[in-house]
Structure formats: C-alpha cells, structure tokens
C-alpha cells in the first residue's frame, strides 16, 4: 500500500533544504549581531572591572586620608583658638591695612572715571 509519489518526495526534500538554509541564516545573523555589539562596546571606551576596583580602592584610601587630615586640622585649630582673642593691636591693624579684591577693583574703577 505504499505509494511512491514523486511530488511528496520533492516537497520533503525542499522542506529539508529550507530547514538547513534557515539554520545557516540563523547562524549568520547571530554572528553579525555579535560583531555589531562588540564594535559598539569597543567604541564606548569602557573600563575593565579590575581597573575600576583598583581606582575605587584608591578613592576609598584618599577619602580616609582626607578624613584623617580634617580631624588633625580641627585639632590644630582648636589648639590655636585660645591664642586668637589675644591678638595684638598691630596684628589687627595689619589685617585691616590689606585691601580686598573688591576694594582694589573699586579704586581702579574710580581712576578710570577720573581720566
């Protein structure tokens, strides 16, 4: 009862060929997509993880050093604070005699308008 129908045999060959062609196209599309993504990632200039971790560790150390120096500066300022109210009059007048930037620019503006 088996029939040898050449039409069905040809259709099965075409279907098998189409399936293998689709599998080949799928592989090519995946390869092209992978290349596209790799090119885009390379153009982003991303940092590798190990370099990022090293810089983060350096930043943490710098932050700790900054905190330590801030505490040291606060302690030194605290030691000098009692000496500040007892400044002499000469030190106060010397401080007043030093003109500020705004005073200098105001003087320069007055000179320009007089000329």
Image (cartoon, helix red, strand yellow):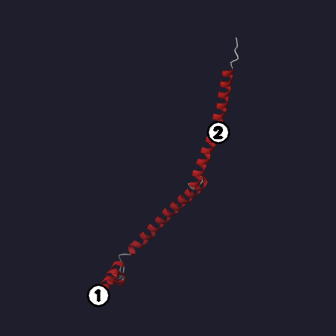
Badge 2 local density, few (<14 within 10 Å), some, or many (20+)?
Answer: few
As rendered, which of 100 and 33 lies closer to the eye? Answer: 33
Q: Residue at x 38, y 75 (%)?
A: 84
Residue 103 location in percent, x, y?
A: 33, 80
Which numbered tag is attached to residue 93? none
Badge 1 local density, few (<14 within 10 Å), some, or many (20+)?
Answer: few
Q: Mark 1 points at which residue?
A: 114
Pick whichever of labels 1 and 2 is earlier in the sequence. Answer: 2
Which numbered tag is attached to residue 27? 2
Residue 34 location in percent, x, y?
A: 61, 45
As rendered, which of 23 and 80 lies closer to the eye? Answer: 23
Residue 37 location in percent, x, y?
A: 58, 47
Specify the quadrant that holds the C terminus: bottom left
Q: Which residue is drawn at 36% across and 84% down?
A: 90
Q: Residue at x 48, y 67 (%)?
A: 72
As rendered, which of 88 and 56 lies closer to the eye? Answer: 56
Q: In which quarter of the image is residue 1?
A: top right
Mark 1 vs mark 2: give the one in front: 2
Label 1, secondary structure: give it: helix
């Amino acid at each position: 009862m088996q029939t040898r129908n050449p039409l069905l045999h040809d259709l099965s060959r075409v279907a098998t060929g189409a399936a293998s062609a689709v599998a080949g196209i799928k592989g090519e599309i995946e390869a092209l997509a992978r290349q596209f993504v790799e090119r885009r990632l390379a153009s982003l200039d991303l940092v590798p993880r190990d370099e990022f971790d090293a810089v983060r560790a350096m930043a943490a150390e710098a932050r700790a050093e900054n905190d330590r120096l801030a505490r040291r500066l606060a302690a030194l300022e605290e030691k000098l604070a009692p000496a500040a109210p007892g400044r002499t009059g000469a030190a106060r007048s010397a401080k007043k005699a030093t003109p500020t930037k705004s005073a200098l620019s105001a003087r320069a503006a007055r000179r320009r308008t007089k000329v």
